[in-house]
Structure formats: C-alpha cells, structure tokens
Image (cartoon, rainbow, N blue to C red):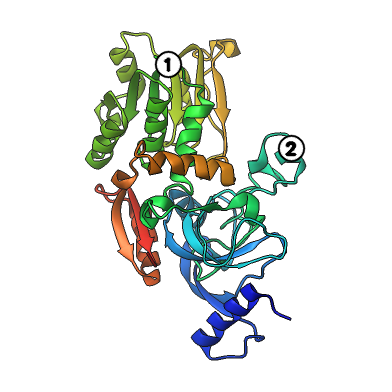
Amino acid sequence: MNTAHETCVNRRFTEKEGSDPNMAKKIKGLAMLKIGEIGWIEKDAPECGPLDAIVKPLAVAPCSSDVHTVWEGALGERTDMILGHEAVGEVVEVGSLVKEFKPGDRVIVPAITPDWMSEEAQAGFAMHSGGMLAGWKFSNFKDGVFGELFHVNEADGNLALLSDSIPVAEATMLSDMVPTGFQAAELAEIEFGDTVCCIGIGPVGLMAVAGSNMMGASHILAVGSRQVCVDAARGYGATDIINYKDGDIVDQVFEKTDGKGVDKVCIAGGDVHTMEQAVKMVKPGGIISNVNYLGSGEHVFIPRVEWGCGMAHKAIQGGLMLGGRRRMEKLASLVEVGKLDLSPLLTHRYRGFDKLEEALLLMKDKPRDLIKPVVVIEE
C-alpha cells in the first residue's frame, strides 16, 4: 500500500507523462557529457532511500566550481553527470524514516551533504565523510541539482526549511556562496581589530569580506578589479581596494599597511601561486585561510624565506564549507533579520529551467558586469 507522499509523487508523474506510475520515470537535466562538453540528457528519476528526500528545484545557480569541473577537468573525467550544487527546492518525497520534512516543504539545500553517522563526522570533519572532500556529493560523486528532480541523502541532517521571508533567488546563495565565504573568515580566526586581506572578490570572496566584517576586522583590503565587485565589496565592509592590474598585490598591501603586512588573509580566488603572495603579506603569527577551488596545477607554492624558513608561525588552513541543517538555518537567520543582504550578489537573473545552459556559460565567460547568475524556476 502506498503512503500518502508516494501517492502524491506518483500522481505528479502520471499527470505529467500520462503513463503508468509504476513505470520508470524519466527526468531531464543539464549534464557534463565529458571534459569540455555539456548538454541536456534524460535519466531515470532518482530513488528515495528511507533517510532521504527527493526535491524539485525552485531556483538554482551555476558556480565557478562547475566551470572547473567541466572545462578544466579538475575532478577527472565525468560522463553524463548532471551538474549543479546550489539550489533551493520543494520536497516531493521523503523516506520512511525522515521526521522533520514532508512533501511541499520549501528547503535550502546545502552544496555539501555529509553522511552524519560517519567516523569523519564524529571527528568534527563531516564535509570529508567517506574520504577527503566526499561530503561534496552533488556533481562530484552523484547527479547534481540541475535536474527536474534530485536526491538528498540524510534529509533530516542536510535540509533546512526556507522562510517565506527570503526570496528563492537570494536563498540560493545560502547553498554555497555564503557558507564558503564565511568559512574563509572563520578559518582565518579573525579577531576584533584585525587587518585582513581578502584575495578574490567574486561571490565567495565578497562573502569572505562580509564575514570578516561581522567578525570584527577593522581594515579589510579586498583584491579585485571588476567595478561591480569593487562596489559590492565596499558595501560589505571593505575599507581598501587593491587592483592587481596596478602592480604586485604584496607591494600594495605593504604600502597600505605602512610596511607591516596583514594579520589574516582569506583566499577566495587566484591560482597555485596565490598562496605565495599570501605568505609574503601576512605577519608572523598570522593565519592564511583558503577556500579557493584550485582547478589546475600540480603544486601550491610557498616561499621559503618569507615563511621564515618554515618557522615564521604563519599558519595555513584550507577547508571545504560546512554543511548541515543547523549551519544553513543560522546563516539564513542573518538574512531574515536584515544583517546580510544577498541581493548585490545577483547581477544576472534568469527565469525558466531551460535557461540553465545560458547561465552556466555566462559563469564560464565571466563578463565584467557579472558577480553571480541565478535561475528561478518557480517562486
């Protein structure tokens, strides 16, 4: 006998396809066909385990990580894998053991969905449950959120209810951009009065600026060149802008800090050589945090002398964003009470599932007026 939620889901597919609800259901999705190539494919709909949920997207956003994955082959070859890891959605089915969610609930879906009963989660590193970076499942180990339906493991631990007060477009930024940027500030252990340099002021870097500001940094030096990002950075609390087109950013940092350097560095952009710049500009006893996805290169470079021949007490921390319901709800509360405005991030808004490919290609091309595109499928 079908449960109420199974009947509801089956009815939805029957009305859409006019078919036997017991037949295999198909969904459409935007996928990585192979390295360097994307396209629309059809797949079997995901199945719901007893702890899990099936969700339909209400709004999704492409990410630079999707670009690294497809066009740089950063994760290796992936064939016919539906892309995307940033979404808010509506629950259409829950497993028999799910307690906190039901069909019809609007939810924030974090980009990282750990296995909360894993050994790694018990050790405090849930994002690495099952192995390094393995808490990142969407468009890495399994199909992502750019499909008509997608699967969420351990729904009670990995979904968060979405308040009606937060528009779905803005809420999508809570999936990845906000938690990743704030993670940079947290890993840097920013204290009141710190001078901080945020390298890279795309959407994640802007949230690193906002997080640094909230944690009490006094001077925030934001490194970037696009005017739309510069304006947003100032709005989020940047006190100084460093344009890498105007010369070496390390020299500029020392000039703005009277030769002292900075207490903390948050890296949210750049390449394998960016760490070298960070080590040079941070003071002894300082901390460098990295949340930048390095999509290419074999080694990260650290300068020997400026690292004090290995003894300068310049700490380096890199981390994948935290996932989980508690984290999502806490960050959402900042938006609800007006302490965090996410609208400046959304420079390009699309409407309709079929606009996904256009939005992803825009993220790949990164025009100068872009911070972040979002695709609203249903309000």
Could you say which is closer to the camera, residue 260 or residue 85? 85
State the image quarter where residue 10 is shown. bottom right
Q: Is residue 296 visible?
A: no
Q: Which amino acid type corresponds to the residue marked 1 in the rendered image?
A: Phe
Vertical comparison of 164 with 290: above or below? below
Disc nearer the start of the sequence (2/1) = 2
Res. 4 mark: none
Residue at figure coordinates x 45%, y 53% from the top left = 67
- Write down the residue under mark 1: 192
Q: Position of residue 256 (x, y in %)?
A: 29, 15
The answer to whether 245 appears left or right of 17 in the picture is left
The answer to whether 111 appears left or right of 379 in the picture is right
Could you say which is closer to the camera, residue 89 or residue 352? 89
Q: Position of residue 223 (x, y in %)?
A: 33, 30
Q: Secondary structure at mark 1?
A: loop
- Write down the residue under mark 2: 122
Q: Secondary structure at mark 2?
A: helix
